[in-house]
């Protein structure tokens, strides 16, 4: 999991907005704004969203309807929920189970040989000994969860991926997938002495549990298996709907584990065959503008690494041309950086849904800001102002804008030799309204213009745009292109049941003495999870895990930790949610 930017609306933006308001009203020529506005919307989105707002029985006009709370009435052994949340012995045992998993260092590196290249575990370990801990983890899980391993079908996909299948009694019901990953990001040796507890030993200070992977995301993996084990131990719940646990092994690097699992599940169940997929993601809830928001990510930005190389003839540096390849590349870099992507906010972006929730339900959000948000899809000027204040803050800017960062540059080898090769890598995270092709087109344009200026050739992804000549050529290749994820809908039974069950968790179980309504709103993730491989399996993909909010999680860094009480929210939630979703009527989804 990649850490998310925090709040979408800050007080400082409000003030900025109020100050700038007059200016924007004056400066925005109506015709110009209307053009931008219409140009940025697909006609369908525009029609559906402006003329047919989401129908909700309680408040048909609401842009952010409050999902009805889903009570776990009629589940087996409802008392077990309190046991999960409060029993000391159970908590100690769970702590040991989680620490046991932390103590197996399933670190994943970008340069690891992928398991596919081996036929069996022996040859895989010969090829790449660093996979060894994953086999240890499998043994550990087998030992720790005997019932799950006895009653569920356990498949190893591509050697290391784990798929657990609890077959339901009714094959007409679409299965549900709960996902997590086995791997963790490596710990840098130089940081070892900065850890409160050794990262692969772990420790508990009475409140927080420490260790690499404790938060990202062995807590989820262990929590899910503990839930299944508990349900099996009680022996009361016999699912009608098939339950699948899917655990990849390289989420933190290439994601080949989830890709192979996805192929396997697609061949078994077919496309769009899964009711819901819930993976790691946003945790717990956030307090923003006086509201408590539960924010499952319903979308993810796209991704592209653009590698742009320039080859030019070498020579002695005592008789250089006016611009060496490094100088030419510098001009390209300048052009690319001077032409940043424009911010854009349409209703396709889950952030819009989150903003609607703030505008409709926040007791303290500035009135002008509210008004602008509520009109942002029908009034170009209001949209422009909302975009302006999101754009003004680095933390929210990239929720509405494709990013570009020149992250790597290489070139030249010697002080007296002209550089014959220079390359750059530009990393882009693509906003939901744009595509990989939009990003390529932009760099294509700039490379072509510089190539023409210096009489250079240009090859784009193996295709010749300008034939290479004596002066040399650009070679632009694409690495790991990923389109923005399809956005999961929030106007139906799937969202309502998931969100409604989460409301029950926080309102009735975690904070029974408070009267706060938790608002469930969609969210856009700027990073990617294993769900990037699962799009074809389900329309309803949520990246979210229950827990308690806390600061400084140390994810991907020193002293990764977890507020341990929150861990039991995962188990309590899935204990009843799996029973609720079992009963759900697929026809309504
Ligand atoms: C895997 O098995 C195939 C077929 O038996 C064989 O051709 C191939 O060389 C094997 N690969 C490795 C890496 O052992
Ligand atoms: C361009 O780059 C790609 C990717 O590195 C490489 O496979 C290809 O051979 C290069 N083409 C030329 C003409 O340099
Ligand atoms: C919650 O609501 C009840 C009934 O309206 C009221 O008696 C109680 O004081 C409220 N509690 C809090 C913490 O606001
Ligand atoms: Zn993760």
Image (cartoon, grey):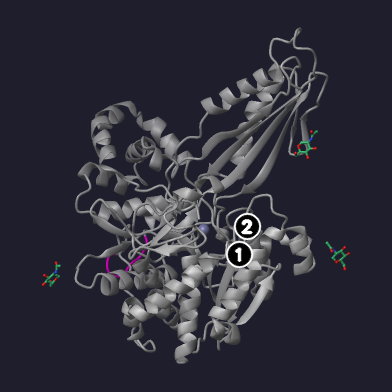
Residue that numbered label 1 is attached to = 248
Residue 100 horizontal side relative to residue 260, left or right: left
Q: Earlier in the sequence, mark 1 or mark 2?
A: 1
Residue 412 horizontal side relative to residue 242, left or right: right
Majority secondary structure of the magenta segment? loop
As for residue 537 lying within the magenta part, the answer is no
- Label annotation for residue 574: none
Instruction: Say if mark 1 contacts mark 2, CB within 8 Å.
Output: yes
Residue that numbered label 2 is attached to = 255
Q: Residue at 48% x, 74% y: name it.
A: 97
Question: Is 102 above or below relative to 556?
Answer: below
- Residue 60 percent location from the top left of the image: 30, 64
Question: Is 251 above or below relative to 148?
Answer: above
How many numbered circles are shown?
Answer: 2
- Residue 565 percent location from the top left of the image: 34, 68
Q: Give the alpha-carbon distance from disc 1 to disc 2, as whole Å.
A: 7 Å
Badge 2 residue CB within 8 Å of ligand 4 = no
Q: Residue at 19% x, 68% y: name it.
A: 515
Question: Does dot 2 land on a helix, a strand or a loop?
Answer: loop
As for residue 58 lying within the magenta part, the answer is yes
Q: Residue furthest bottom?
A: 236
State whether residue 557 appears in this view.
no
Residue 450 horizontal side relative to residue 397, left or right: right
Q: Quadrant of residue 451?
A: top right
- Residue 18 percent location from the top left of the image: 23, 35
The region drawn magenta spans: 54-59
């Amino acid at each position: 999991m990649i850490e998310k930017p925090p709040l979408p609306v800050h007080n400082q933006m409000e003030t900025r907005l109020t100050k700038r308001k007059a200016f924007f009203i004056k400066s925005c020529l109506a015709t110009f704004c209307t053009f931008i506005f219409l140009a940025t919307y697909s006609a369908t989105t525009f029609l559906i969203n402006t003329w047919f707002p989401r129908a909700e029985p309680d408040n048909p006009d609401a842009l952010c309807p409050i999902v009805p709370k889903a009570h776990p009435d009629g589940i087996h052994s409802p008392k077990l929920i309190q046991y999960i949340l409060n029993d000391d012995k159970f908590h100690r045992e769970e702590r040991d189970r989680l620490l046991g998993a932390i103590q197996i260092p399933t670190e994943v590196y970008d340069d690891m040989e992928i398991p596919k290249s081996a036929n069996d575990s022996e040859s895989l370990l010969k090829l790449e000994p660093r996979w060894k801990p994953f086999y240890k983890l499998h043994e550990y899980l087998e030992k720790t969860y005997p019932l799950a391993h006895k009653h569920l079908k356990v498949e190893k996909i591509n050697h290391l991926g784990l798929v657990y299948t609890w077959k339901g009694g009714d094959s007409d019901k679409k299965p549900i997938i709960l996902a997590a990953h086995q791997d963790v990001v490596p710990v840098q040796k130089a940081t070892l002495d900065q850890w409160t507890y050794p990262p692969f030993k772990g420790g508990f200070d009475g409140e927080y549990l420490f260790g690499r992977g404790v938060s990202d995301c062995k807590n989820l993996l262990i929590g899910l298996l503990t839930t299944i084990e508990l349900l099996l131990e009680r022996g009361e719940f016999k699912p009608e709907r098939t339950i699948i646990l899917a655990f990849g092994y390289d989420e933190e690097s290439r994601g080949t584990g989830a890709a192979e699992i996805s192929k396997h599940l697609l061949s078994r169940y077919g496309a769009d065959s899964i009711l819901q997929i819930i993976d790691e993601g946003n945790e717990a809830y956030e307090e923003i503008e006086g509201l408590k928001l539960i924010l499952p990510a319903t979308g993810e930005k796209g991704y592209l690494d653009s590698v742009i190389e320039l080859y030019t003839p070498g020579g002695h540096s005592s008789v250089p041309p006016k611009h060496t390849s490094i100088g030419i590349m510098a001009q390209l870099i300048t052009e690319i950086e001077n032409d940043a992507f424009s911010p854009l906010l349409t209703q396709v972006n889950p952030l819009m849904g989150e903003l609607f929730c703030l505008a409709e339900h926040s007791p303290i959000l500035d009135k002008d800001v509210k008004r602008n948000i509520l009109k942002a899809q029908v009034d170009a000027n209001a949209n422009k102002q909302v975009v302006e204040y999101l754009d003004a803050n680095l933390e929210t800017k990239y929720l509405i804008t494709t990013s570009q960062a020149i992250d790597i540059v290489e070139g030249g080898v010697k002080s007296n030799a002209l550089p014959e090769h220079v390359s750059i890598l530009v990393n882009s995270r693509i906003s939901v309204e744009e595509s990989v092709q939009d990003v390529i087109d932009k760099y294509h344009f700039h490379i072509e213009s510089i190539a023409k200026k210096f009489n250079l050739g240009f090859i784009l992804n193996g295709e010749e745009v300008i034939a290479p000549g004596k002066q040399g050529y650009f070679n632009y290749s694409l690495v790991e292109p990923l389109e923005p994820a399809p956005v999961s809908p929030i106007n139906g039974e799937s969202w309502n049941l998931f969100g409604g069950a989460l409301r029950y968790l926080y309102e009735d179980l975690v904070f029974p003495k408070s009267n706060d309504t938790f608002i469930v709103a969609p969210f856009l993730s700027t990073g990617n999870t294993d769900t990037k491989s699962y799009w074809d399996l389900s329309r309803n993909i949520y990246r979210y895990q229950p827990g308690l909010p806390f600061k400084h999680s140390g994810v991907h860094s020193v002293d990764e930790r977890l507020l341990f009480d929150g861990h039991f929210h995962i188990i309590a939630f899935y204990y009843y949610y799996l029973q609720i979703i079992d009963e759900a009527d697929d026809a309504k989804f």
